Structure formats: structure tokens, C-alpha cells
Image: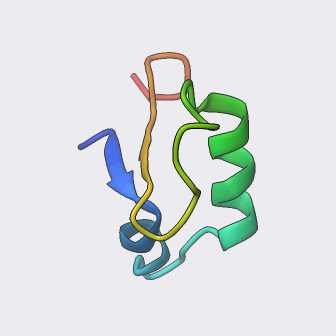
């Protein structure tokens, strides 16, 4: 499974997370959160601590 997706791609899934859930995840995990505005084109990446192994 790919560990990277944009917020828009995630919201297009059959059972999508909410925009607020994506924003909360970004706030907790986005290293450079203050450099760019958060939006549908924001790329979220699930690192090893979140990925299912």
C-alpha cells in the first residue's frame, strides 16, 4: 500500500476520513506545517509508526 496521498485523494475513498480528521493528522504529523496552507492538494504521509506491518 502507498503511504502517501493528498487530502483530496483520501476524501475520494469509499469510506473517506473527514476533512477535519485529515487536518488533525496533518497538524500532528506535518513537519513543515507553517510553510504551506493546508488544502485538498496537501500530501499526507503515513510513516512507520502509523503503518500496518
Residue 43 coordinates in the image, percent (x, y): 39, 50
Examine the rendered structure and indicate whether residue 17 appears above or below residue 23. below
Residue at the (39%, 65%) spot, across then down: 41
Which residue occupies the extreme front position in the image?
A: 35
Q: Is residue 52 toward the left or the right of residue 49 in the image? A: left
Q: Quadrant of residue 6?
A: bottom left
Residue 27 coordinates in the image, percent (x, y): 71, 40
Q: Quadrant of residue 9?
A: bottom left
Q: Is residue 50 toward the left or the right of residue 48 in the image? A: right
Residue 18 coordinates in the image, percent (x, y): 68, 72
Residue at the (62%, 43%) spot, across then down: 26
Q: Nearer the viewer, residue 12 or 15?
A: 12
Residue 31 coordinates in the image, percent (x, y): 56, 24
Q: For the N terminus, give its image quadrant.
A: top left
Which residue occupies the extreme top position in the image?
A: 49
Examine the rendered structure and indicate whether residue 13 appears above or below residue 53. below
Amino acid at each position: 500500500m502507498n503511504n502517501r496521498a493528498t487530502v483530496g485523494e483520501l476524501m475520494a475513498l469509499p469510506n473517506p476520513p473527514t476533512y477535519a480528521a485529515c487536518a488533525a493528522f496533518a497538524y500532528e504529523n506535518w513537519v513543515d506545517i507553517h510553510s504551506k496552507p493546508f488544502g485538498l492538494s496537501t500530501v499526507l504521509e503515513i510513516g512507520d509508526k502509523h503503518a500496518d506491518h
